[in-house]
Amino acid sequence: MASRIVITGTGIICGLGRDAATVGRALRAGHSAIAPIRHWEAAGWPHRYAAEIADLDPRALVADRKSLKLLRRSHVLGLYAAAQAVEQAGFLGQRAALPAAAAAAFNDRSGIYVGSSGTTYQDQYDFLPLLARSEGDLVRFGRDLTAAVPPMWLLQSLPNNVLCHFGIQTGFTGPHACVVTHSTGGVLAVAEAAAALRDGLADRAVAVAHEAPLEPQTMRGYADLGVLARETVRPFDQGRDGTLLGEGAAALALEMAGTRGGAELGELLGSAEVSEGGALLGVRADGDGLARAMQLALADAGCGPADIGMIVAHGNGTRASDASEAIAIRRVFGAAAPPVTSFKWALGHTLAAAAVLDTVLALDALAAGEVPGIATLRETDRSCQPLPVSRRPQRPRGRIALILSRGFAGTNAALVVRAA
Amino acid sequence: MSGDRSPPARRRVLITGIGLVTPLGLDAPATWGALLAGTSGIDVVRSFDASGFPVRIGAEVKGFDDTRVERGLRRYATRQHRFALAAAAEALRDAGVAPTPETAAHWACIVGAGMMGVEFADLAAFQRRAAPEGVLRPDRVAEPASAVAFARNQPTAGLALLVRRFGIQGRAAAMHTACASGGQALGAAMRLIRHGTADCALAGGFDAMLNPIGLAGFCLLGALSADNHDPPRASRPFDRSRNGFVLGEGAGFLVLEAADVARRRGARAYAELAGDGNALSSYRITDSHPSGRGPIEAMRHALADANEPPEAVDYLNAHGTSTPMNDRSECAAVRAVLGAQAARLAVSSTKSLMGHLIAAAGAVEAAICALAIRDGVAPASANLRQPDPDCHLPFVTGAPQRRPIRVALSNAFGFGGSNNCLVLRAAPAA
């Protein structure tokens, strides 16, 4: 297997902690980060629960504090997770040992791949005072512009900010992408990184996904779509009433096996993403897109359903998504699915970051030999049965995990990793 | 698709359809005709009252007919999405092919999505509701509202509309690297076809930042030409007197097909999409390195990917924004990559006539390269009267230059340091 892609570093930050071991332990202990929103006044909101990162101090998370004025909350999370993964993989130490010309070549052969849903709503809040003051008069709006809005506003709002700033921070100059495909953006970032490694365009890459959707307009939007729960996410439960948003970021440091003898946490075996080509936001009731994504990812990984040791489902807790996801899993695995879990009951739905968080935590679960249970599960929905989900921890059936992800534009994605 | 079918050694990827909505025209023939005629698409901004802004000119899409977008989709489609849907429909019509229930899973849709997610009218409505005094009051957002504005302002909305409208069921991805977005989307789509993940792709870019917020953002950065008195002259890539870019809007889509698939149905091709190169500047957020580092590697990687030597390049559609720094750095990069061979090139920046289409630019300009190859003509760079001595390249000025073009390069460099170069090549004889 000359073309193995190995995972030599992971990074994570979410409501349950700032490193994989801590978050994994908390999950196994049944801890949840979901609570009423604290960083803005949400009293009176019917949907005010979310998985926030408490006491977030951006200055403690970013190496270059000067850059903070150009970064939004989501960007800070992404940079932190990416730096953690690169640190664990030892990429920068490896480069430091090289002569200058070889170090430049090292940078050219180092890729950065980013996924996020692409923040938008809060980016424009800097214009609210000007809009209020100009009272619909665009002439006044234009005239007062430079006095009312920060000059660097556009640069704070670049959807590709994590890519840009992580490049400047590390000096990596290789192939790259910034995927903004709602919740499947994380898997796509990993898939693009894997393609670049397999094509020989890079020797190593970091794939990072980040999200910070806990601001009023975004939460309002999801509530208006009718997908938010009141206070608890209960994936696959009979009484589930929706999902809750979370914030976080996660990253994988990837390299071609044999590039060096570093510690291997696992292996990226395969991935796939497809669209259902139907609803703008919703999912098909028969789970067709997700089933196809699983089959393609298994084929890409060169393995069959029997090789999968555990599944981290999308399991967002909405009626429609969980029911159709269970159908899709049955279509691919028949009655022989491995243990299935979902982490959104504890971490919330972190959109594009979710699947990469799940991947980091799946590696931790496989290393611990224990699939965390869904602590909020009371009674598995009949429409989701048979599905091997449990409140209690389960034993993985093998060393390979399948991670599932679904998003707007009818997109469905799957990722296959093996733990070392 | 992938895995169960091992892709042939190196599948070639052909461009079999083109669709454009640009400041120069509402479809590809009109855009190409205006470009060759040297007509400028730059004028005073008319879609809103920009008279109080420091910059009051832009390259607007003029006379776009919203009924080109299906009624049922229209309220979910903002201006940039409408351009995208129209350009994509034209590209598919032009290619004479469309996804069917049998082929839908083998079609990919890869887009360079516009930077500005939120439509100005929706933001203004939100301000009146949630921040009447200018300060956001969460209590005023606690009441339920329609989710339509939320849906249409999602960064994924354009992609969602496209896959739904055309029934695409393979890989679907939206990407954004500012002004490199459209080029990177085409490159990513090309690779999917090469790998066998898809047989066909609807790929391109769209953007519409010519609204009060988008114009404001670039005004604040001081990136735009403020030549309000003479709009058609304002975009002067490589000219000594250049003073910034002109903001445009529009969409460009290509139908990409594996050569084996296109040949089976007897399709005609404009050109082959033969190479894709990307490099990150990792220098500054808005400036490229004066030495051309970043663009140099992007061009080298693209040529290597296409297996073409530098001396094979006949035409370069430059990124050529008309900002002092970009144009100088790009010229340094072209000289570094092509060396003495740069002398036999034809170079132009079509932004001189159509402005800068931001996330759509790379896709629209790749389409122009395909048309240049088909017709054997390099469009001229307008307004280039006194070339900057630091920008010494063989520019096409005055009239378009008729010459056989076998290999063309399209550069697209973005804020944030993403550099993309695409290689287009005359299609191999069937």
Image (spheres, grey):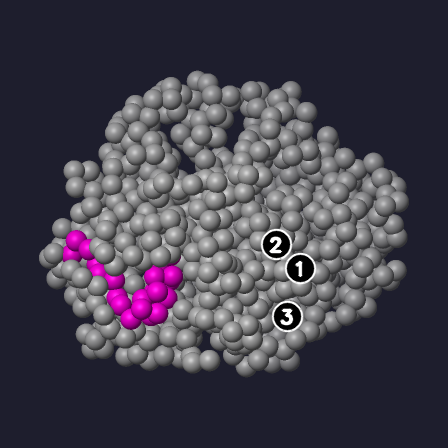
Q: In this rendering, which labeled residue sits more in front, label 3 or label 1?
A: 1
Q: Are marks 1 and 2 in contact (CB under 8 Å)?
A: yes
- Hey, what amino acid is under mark 3? Ser
Identify whether B44 is placed above or below B405: above
- Viewer-proximal residue among B355 and A351: B355
Quadrant of res B330 = bottom left
| Residue B331 image position (x, y, % from top left) | 23, 64
Q: Earlier in the sequence, mark 3 or mark 1?
A: 3
From the image, tell me which residue sits under label 1.
Answer: B101
Disc 2 is placed on an element classified as loop
Q: Chain of mark 3?
A: B
| Residue B229 image position (x, y, % from top left) | 16, 38
Disc 3 is placed on an element classified as loop
Q: Quadrant of the N terminus of chain B?
A: bottom right
| Residue B64 image position (x, y, % from top left) | 39, 42
> Would you say B320 lies left or right of A342 here?
left
Residues at marks 3 and 1, CA–CA distance in whole angstroms: 18 Å
| Residue A94 image position (x, y, % from top left) | 48, 70
Q: Is residue B372 magenta?
A: yes
Residues at marks 1 and 2, CA–CA distance in whole angstroms: 8 Å
Identify whether B265 is placed above or below B354: below
From the image, tell me which residue sits under label 3.
Answer: B2
Quadrant of res A100 = bottom left
Residues at marks 2 and 3, CA–CA distance in whole angstroms: 20 Å
Instruction: Please give the name of the residue rendered at 52% of the width and 47% of the height, measured from the top-left corner.
Output: B158
Q: How many C-alpha atoms fall within 10 Å of the one at disc 2: few (<14), some, or many (≥20)? A: many
From the image, tell me which residue sits under label 2.
Answer: B167
- Hey, what amino acid is under mark 1? Pro
Q: Extreme left residue here?
A: B386
Instruction: Please give the name of the residue rendered at 27% of the width and 47% of the height, measured from the top-left corner.
Output: B41
Q: Which residues are magenta?
A: B364-384
